[in-house]
Amino acid sequence: MKNTFAKISPFQVDPEKIMDTFGIRDDDFTAASSQEKESMVEMHKSISFWQDAWRRFRANTVSMVALFVFLLCLVFAFIGPKLIPYTYADQYRSAQKLGPFEYSKSEALVRSVQKSADGFYATALRPGSLTAIAKGDYFVRAGGQTYAFTMAKAAEKSVLLLKAGDPEPLRLVAEKDIENGTYTKYTAMEVSDTPAQGATELKLTRRVFPHVFGTDSQGRDIMARTMYGARVSIIIGIMAALIVLVIGSLYGAISGLCGGVVDFIMMRIVELIYSVPEVLIVLLLQVVLKDPLQMWFQNHSATSAFVRAMSDLGAGIVSIFITFAVLYWVTMARIIRGQVLQLKKQEYVTAATALGASNARIIRKHLLPNCIGPLVITTCLQIPSAIFLESFLSFLGLGVSAPMASLGSLCSDALETISLYPYRLVFPAIVLTIIVLTLNLVGDGLRDALDPRLKK
Amino acid sequence: MGTYILKRIVGSVLILLLIMVVTFLLMNAIPGSPFLTEKSTPEQIAMAEAKYGLDKPLHIQLLNYIKNYLKGDLGTSLKMQEGTPVKNIIFHQGKFVLSIKLGLFALLLAVCLGIPLGCLAAYYRGSWLDGVLRVVTTIGVAIPTFVLAALLLVVFSVKLKWVPTLSGSLTDTKSYILPVISLSSYYTCYIAKLMRTSMLDAINQDYIRTARAKGVKTSGLILKHALRNSLIPVVTYLGPVTAGIITGSFVVESTFSVPGLGKYFVQCVMSRDYPVIMATTVVLSALVIFAMLVVDIAYKIVDPRITLTTKEE
């Protein structure tokens, strides 16, 4: 190597010597191959905000269990009704006031038939329930055979019994006969093996579904009602939370961003609503809104799908939504305003303003996305509070109206007969408590996961 | 301080006025007349309405209400107890006293139980006691008041027969137990949770370490140094508690058949007894607003660092 260094250096330094002294070799200066480069870079895969939050959430055992239980509740509320043969509104005669896992006389008979090896029964509508069989042609398939028959007149609440090896295999047993114990007097029917044209197939089933939670005084299955009630309660909770989310976040963001007089006035309004004892107003609102809403539904239901959906929910529930829209957004607005006050001093907001972004755009693109943590947490914690309010109103006889049910109205109905049938209260109450509990825990977990600074 | 209190009082009165206006408008938005029954003819309704001044224009009715309220006249009942002055119904038939008693006991229980429990949980953090308390309080804030009330009723009055089923007018001590417990349980649990968090916060502060290094006894440390500083969130929460206890009293009074103001309010809303609705709303609102005012002032006393007059972030 030619010593060029010496020419410009005032000192006589020999680079070769230096390199020797420090043990540096020539090939240390060759460019690294891409493989070598890769092995040197210690890069973690970049984690997005949500992945990071999910990682933290997953580490929180309590919240994970709560989330799992809440998902179970969702399955119970939304898929459960499809799995059991009872509906929330149907009243099953002779099945009134049953305890958990009890059967009415006729259901018990059907069960006993099923147990006798080759017994079947068929009903007209849904398996497991004893329902009327209308006049008409029917066929039933059982044991590889088709039995077709004609009902000359409608048979009320009856069971079709099929017994293999019986000379007259198809029997129609009226529920009345079952209850009186006179079901041996079968009504024999003409049976053929080719179904008539247009004949309806009767559902054939081997099981009677137990009334797991018992039945109420009108013979309605409490489990079906609890599932339905849980669904109503959860929908109300989520809808109300969304209403609060939209109104509260927009209000808070506008107030925080505009500042000055606008902020002052908007915050005074918030304080005012905050100090109004809301339940008094809620009760009044419930009573006030009920009739006008019903009128509105009747007049407009033909014109818009939205109104039809609302009227399906009923005036009681819609007025709960209105109540939330009027009174319950203040907490959200306060939280978001606080966040926005901090965020609006950030450079990116200044930059956006300098680039000519409108206030609406700044709120939409910069402020609200950066508030996502508090937004999600507050919304999640709003759901149980909405469920609480709904159940409270239903308990007082406002809220949902019969035959519709919510967890609150179920508890309230159960209270009348509490000393005789405590289980009627216990089941919906447990479901209600579990839903609220798990949502609270999930909300806490979300807070820890999304906003670690808040963790104490 | 004086100006602040004055400002707050003026603000409270304004809010009360606003509540009156809103209530009045809402009441009048309920379709139908309070005198509408199956038998009544239009003439009878008109006569009854004229008697109580319901035929006058709305703003005059409203002004009359406000004028009378300023004079301390709450009007007379139209339906529930026809002709009886509302003031008598609320204050002299024991309803107000009953509700207040129930509410105060519940508040007292929530504070007296919640704060020590929170302190205990914070002090023995991580121990089995903390664990048990955490489970209990977490479940406690998830059980609706009416569910708890009903369950207590079944277990302790129906099955065990320890206390009477109908609490009635709360004449003996026993009948207080269940209503007060069910009314206060949520708040006890909430306050305990709140207290635990803020106490933990306080315990980890430098001044506690200093005090400990100085040799202050543990009991003195918690009671004197940490407690005072960790009370602030609890005090702030007491305003909403008061409102909540009044709300809860509606449910608890119906469940235990206590003839209090909460139960009565629900009844009179249903029967559209305008003067009674108005009076009950105003009285209950005044209670809540007064509680909020007291809390804000207490807040200042607990923490002298808080300046009340300036309100800027």
Image (cartoon, rainbow, N blue to C red):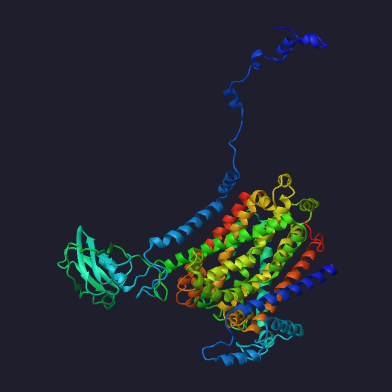
Taking depth in this image into account, of A322 and A99 the one nearest to the observer is A322
Which percent across, then down, holds residue B140? Answer: 59, 64
Q: Is residue B120 visible?
A: no
Residue A15 appears left or right of A401: right
Furthest residue to the right? B2
Which percent across, then down, holds residue B255? Answer: 56, 77
Q: Is residue A321 above or below residue B57?
A: above
Q: How many marks?
A: 0
Q: Is residue B196 above or below residue A291?
A: above
Taking depth in this image into account, of A245 and B164 the one nearest to the observer is A245
Q: Is residue B21 above or below residue A1?
A: below
Q: Quadrant of the N terminus of chain B?
A: bottom right
Residue B189, quarter of the rendered image: bottom right
Furthest residue to the left? A167
Q: Quadrant of the C terminus of chain B?
A: bottom right
Q: Is residue A63 visible?
A: yes
Residue B62, quarter of the rendered image: bottom right
Furthest residue to the top? A2
Taking depth in this image into account, of B7 and B290 the one nearest to the observer is B7
Which percent across, then down, holds residue B158? Answer: 50, 77
Which percent across, then down, holds residue B28? Answer: 63, 80
Q: Is residue B27 above or below residue A169?
A: below
Residue A111 appears left or right of B153: left
The residue under the point 79% across, 64% down is B300
